[in-house]
Image (cartoon, rainbow, N blue to C red):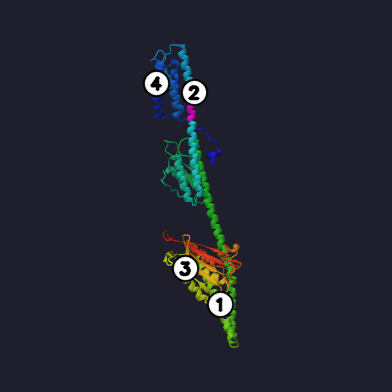
């Protein structure tokens, strides 16, 4: 930060205001009254000390120039009221003249030193205040995730620093509050050329705001406008530091957004490449089987025994089912990438589980499936058809990897404030290295189904995330393997007990 890296210059001494001068006069007057009361009780030379105390108080309370003014007033009061001849400014005795001269010197030095100390303390307090606000801005900027939040943090910081309104102006020259024509011209020059434009001095008719480049970007430049402020160099450095910090954060956010878009584009290209590769393999193989079987039946149907014809028809049916499932998965992936149109409604979770299990049983009649369901479960606000599809994909995945004759358990229960569907199989399990990869498109684990499309769990992940839930896998469950896939959805408040 500029405020910390550059040496702080001493703040210029301020001309005292009317209030400070009046207060100084009152302090000297009180000192005169105290001196009058103490005069019969103290040696003559002690009266000057009373006025020195008044000078010291004035300088400490109100600064350098007030202390100097107080020393002059104290000299006049001491000479007029307490040096012979009294009630005049003449000095009769040489020793009194010497005493007054020494008093003037000591009072001036006292006022100057005390005033300087006061101003240095005030400047230190001001620098501490500026640093505190800059630190708060840094903390706020470190947590912002959008450009608008960064702008708001800067505007708040500039307003606190200067006590006056501040602006952030974009290429549309729109700002709140509205700017004068002179300020509009100044902001436009900074936007086009990227050089600061300082406000006119108070009393002049030109712009009231100083404009500084916030983000130098040919597409979306930004400038910050600060209302004209006093001559404090520390304040100026703090303002520039706040602008530079915010500009760096906005630039980082823009770079992050560009990098994110590039990453998404790369992911889309990767998915497209994987899709083409998968299409060339997974569609070509069943199509070849179907075409070969149909050709054989057409040309040799009369010569083939009935068992052979039935085998060819079964092969056609099986590969047609595979193609249908594959095309369905591709349609689901396309829908996920285009954005789901959710149709939310309150549904009974056991109904969703029963519907998904019924579909699996129709497709695989010989599979053993049990469905333990916790009683008295609350309703869930979700898209029933999408959630059923996600659960069906998990059960279908378990069916593909679990050996024939084993049991698949599809359970539903409360779990730590969520409603959790789980699908547990007795297959070989999922290796630790595959437990995140299997949820990506076209990725099959080492123990995955050999004829799978690699899309089912990726579709499940997209659906569950779109519905505001979470999913995961636990494996192994036993020394022999096994895996449990779970889908968890937060329960509404008051229903998670």
Residue 337 at least partly seen: no
What separation in Å lies between label 2 and label 1 (alpha carbons)? Answer: 105 Å
What separation in Å lies between label 3 and label 4 (alpha carbons)? Answer: 93 Å
Residue 1 versus residue 454 in the image, above or below: above
Of the numbered discs 4 and 1, the one sitting upstream in the chain is 4
Q: Is residue 31 one of those drawn in magenta?
A: no
Residue 224 versus residue 440 in the image, above or below: above
Q: Quadrant of the C terminus?
A: bottom left
- Mark identifier at residue 109: 2
What separation in Å lies between label 2 and label 4 (alpha carbons)? Answer: 23 Å
**Crowdedness near tag 2: few (<14), some (14–19) or many (≥20) residues, C-alpha within 10 Å:** some
Residue 265 versus residue 278 in the image, above or below: above
- According to the image, label 4 marks what residue? 34
Residue drawn at x 48%, y 36% is 126
Judge by depth and name the residue closer to the eye, 308 or 206: 308
User: In the rendered structure, are the residues bearing label 3 and label 1 in contact, judged by CB atoms less than 8 Å apart?
Assistant: no
Residue 19 at least partly seen: yes
Question: Which contiguous range is marked in magenta?
Answer: 113-118
- According to the image, label 3 marks what residue? 373
Secondary structure beneath dot 2 equals helix
């Amino acid at each position: 930060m500029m405020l910390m890296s550059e040496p702080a210059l001493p703040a210029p001494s301020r001309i005292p205001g009317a209030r400070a001068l009046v207060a100084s006069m009152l302090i000297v007057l009180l000192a005169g009254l105290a001196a009058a009361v103490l005069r019969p009780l103290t040696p003559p030379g002690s009266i000057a000390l009373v006025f020195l105390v008044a000078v010291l108080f004035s300088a400490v309370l109100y600064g350098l120039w007030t202390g100097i003014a107080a020393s002059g007033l104290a000299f006049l009061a001491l000479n007029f009221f307490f040096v012979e001849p009294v009630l005049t400014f003449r000095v009769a005795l040489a020793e009194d003249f010497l005493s007054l001269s020494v008093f003037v010197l000591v009072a001036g030095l006292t006022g100057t030193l005390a005033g300087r100390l006061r101003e240095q303390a005030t400047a230190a307090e001001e620098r501490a205040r500026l640093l505190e606000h800059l630190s708060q801005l840094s903390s706020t900027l470190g947590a912002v995730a959008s450009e608008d939040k960064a702008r708001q943090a800067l505007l708040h910081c500039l307003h606190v620093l200067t006590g006056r309104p501040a602006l952030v102006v974009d290429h549309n020259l729109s700002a709140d509050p509205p700017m004068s024509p002179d300020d509009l011209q100044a902001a436009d020059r900074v936007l086009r050329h990227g050089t600061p434009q300082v406000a006119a001095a108070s009393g002049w008719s030109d712009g009231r705001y100083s404009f500084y480049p916030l983000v130098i970007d040919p597409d979306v430049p930004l400038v910050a406008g600060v209302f004209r402020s006093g001559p404090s160099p520390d304040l100026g450095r703090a303002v520039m530091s706040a602008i530079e910090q915010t500009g760096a954060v906005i630039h980082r956010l823009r770079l992050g957004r560009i990098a994110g878009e590039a990453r998404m584009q790369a992911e889309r290209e990767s998915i497209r490449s994987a899709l083409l590769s998968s299409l060339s393999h997974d569609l070509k193989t069943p199509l070849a089987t179907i075409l070969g079987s149909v050709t054989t039946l057409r040309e040799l149907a009369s010569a083939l025994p009935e068992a052979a014809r039935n085998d060819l028809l079964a092969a056609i049916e099986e590969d047609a089912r595979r193609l249908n499932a594959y095309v369905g998965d591709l349609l689901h992936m396309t829908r996920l990438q285009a954005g789901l149109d959710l149709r939310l409604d309150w549904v009974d979770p056991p109904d969703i589980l029963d519907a998904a299990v019924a579909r699996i049983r129709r497709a695989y009649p010989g599979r053993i499936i049990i469905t333990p369901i916790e009683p008295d479960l609350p309703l869930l606000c979700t898209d029933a058809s999408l959630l059923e599809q996600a659960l069906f994909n998990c059960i279908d995945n378990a069916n593909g990897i679990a050996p024939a004759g084993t049991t698949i358990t599809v359970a539903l229960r409360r779990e730590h404030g969520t409603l959790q569907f789980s699908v547990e199989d007795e297959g070989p399990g999922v290796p630790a290295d595959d437990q995140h990869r299997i949820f990506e498109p076209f990725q099959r684990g080492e123990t995955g189904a050999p004829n799978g499309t690699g899309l089912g769990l990726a579709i499940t992940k997209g659906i569950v995330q779109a519905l505001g839930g979470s999913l995961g896998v636990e494996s192994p469950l036993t020394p022999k393997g096994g895996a449990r896939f779970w889908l968890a959805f937060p329960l509404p408040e008051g229903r998670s007990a």
